[in-house]
Amino acid sequence: MKLGRLSLALAAAAAATHGRAAAQEPAPPHETFTLQSAAVGEVRRINVYTPPGYATGRARYPVLYMPDGGMEEDFPHLATAVDSAIRAGEMRPVILVGIENTQRRRDMTGPTTVARDSAIAPRVGGSAAFRRFIADELMPQVRRRYRTTGETAIIGESLAGLFIMETFFLQPELFDTYISLSPSLYWNNEELVRMAPARLRARPRLRAALYFASASDDIGPEAGRLAAAFRANAPRGLRWEYQPHPELKHATIYRGEEARVLREWLPPRTRRRDAAPR
């Protein structure tokens, strides 16, 4: 399959997955609020899971943000995975903030000069505005509404994974931990892959954590090239890992990986893996 047709096929598959993901799926108890955004010019709906003991305690918690965070998207299954891991003592308690989509392909993509990229939606390239919404509007609102620490993380898949990788390269201080599953690295002729060496060298003091993965039917070659750029250029303070998953598909990697990556990248505080990135 040629790259153009493959890119469009992956985008269509991801859209179908996110459109039907959780229409009947239960989720742990959670809250919902709406936020008028000047950055994206619309009202956004936010779903929030708080960990066991939150309502009766005074403790503060890290915040895990997720694009594709609607009730008919990925919020129910990820909130269930988070809740299960916390109750099992295998993940540190976090507040999970799900951002419901309005125009997913607009918000998750950066600018592109590639015609096949632009063909996936009437409007693409809105990631900078979506990032401003998160940084300047949503995060302050979450800090006002909930008892939070200064620690933040973000998780997502496919185009949301692309947004997460782009945010890591352009505004890495926004989150402490980045988890990107099958990011759409083909975007704009692999711009993130091509620019990675220079962007990594430009931040020698960066301290963060980054995990990215690929499935058997999506971005393996692109992800392999990106991993090579990290091996050659990653700053010493960056803890990173790339993992190919030939046993998983693009449509199954989120659910197939979420339980493991939550435990590995957001473990209880007593675990050695929670030490500073190295």
Image (cartoon, rainbow, N blue to C red):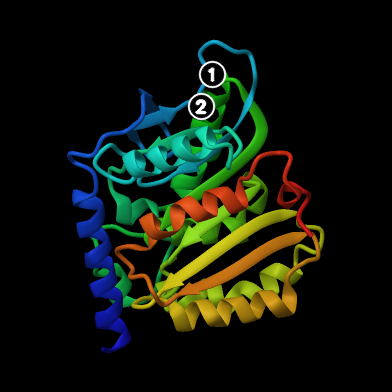
The quarter of the picture where residue 206 lies is bottom right
Image position, residue 126 (x, y; %): 40, 53
The quarter of the picture where residue 56 lies is top right
Judged left or right of residue 32, residue 233 is: right
The disc label shown at residue 51, or none = 2
Q: Which residue is mark 1?
A: 54
Judged left or right of residue 228, residue 222 is: left
Q: Secondary structure at mark 2?
A: loop
Q: Residue at x 24, y 69 (%)?
A: 119
Relative depth, front residue between 21 and 189: 21
Q: Is residue 113 above or below residue 107?
A: below
Whether the residues at callouts 1 and 2 have beta carbons within 8 Å, the answer is yes
Circle 1: residue type: Tyr
Circle 2: residue type: Pro
Quick check: can you spot residue 122?
A: no
Relative depth, front residue between 193 and 48: 48
For label 2, the crowd category at 10 Å Cα-Cα, with few meaning under 14, some 14 to 19 and many 20 or more, is many
Q: Is residue 123 above or below residue 198?
A: above
Image position, residue 131 (x, y; %): 50, 46
Relative depth, front residue between 229 and 88: 88
